[in-house]
Image: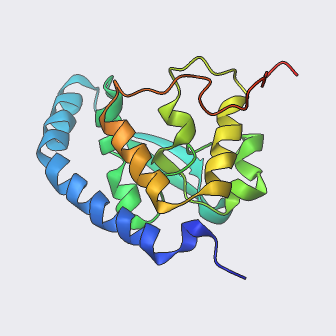
Amino acid sequence: MLPHPHRLPLKRLLDVTLGSVLLALAAPLLALALAVVALRRPAGGVLVRETRTGLDGRPFTLRSLPTRGPRLRLLSRLPHVVRGEMSLVGPAPLPPGDPAALAPWRLSVRPGLTGLAQSRHHSGLPWDEPLLLDQHYVEQHWLGLDLALLLRALLPEARASDADHRLRGYSAAE
């Protein structure tokens, strides 16, 4: 039996290499954002801490900057990628109490900073389709898809339509 695609060393190598480079490049910006948040927040921690479900259903504490800029918030999560708690690309990290967090296909992957469902969040998808997109990503994963989704995350104007992934005649109401 072949190992699951998310457990292959090439995906992990991409996560560690690209994640480390991005973290090094973003470090000055993250330090500045951290200082600004620290000045504006009352005494205490400056990072938001949330429990999320990771690989094999293991919970981990997700730390991120409480900023309004979603890209800066994602960049602040890069240490989780380098440590192996998350991947650059994968399903969104869910809280342990979410029923979808226990889906067998989800337990076999690391949650990602971006993914197929996240890349289409402005497309007007019905509420249940992000879960289907995440499952499709896990089942059909290949490294080229990761690279395409990472490129899409860098180029927000290159958004796909809400129907380009559906079969002709598909309706969520059926």
Q: Is residue 90 visible?
A: yes
Q: Position of residue 89 (x, y in %)?
A: 47, 51
Q: Is residue 90 above or below residue 38?
A: below
Q: Quadrant of the N terminus?
A: bottom right
Q: Is residue 103 above or below residue 99?
A: below
Query: In the rendered view, does 167 fall on the left or right side of 13?
Result: right
Q: Is residue 107 above or below residue 69?
A: below
For the residue pair 33 and 112, the one nearer the viewer reads as: 112
Image quadrant assignment for residue 54: bottom right
Query: In the rendered view, does 13 fall on the left or right side of 134?
Result: left
What coloring was used for the rendering?
A: rainbow
Q: Position of residue 161 (x, y in %)?
A: 53, 22
Q: Residue at x 47, y 61 (%)?
A: 143
Q: Position of residue 94 (x, y in %)?
A: 61, 43
Q: Residue at x 38, y 38 (%)?
A: 152
Q: Residue at x 27, y 26 (%)?
A: 41
Q: Position of residue 155 (x, y in %)?
A: 31, 33
Image quadrant assignment for residue 123: top right
Q: Residue at x 56, y 43 (%)?
A: 92
For the residue pair 47 and 158, the one nearer the viewer reads as: 158
Query: In the rendered view, does 84 fall on the left or right side of 97?
Result: left
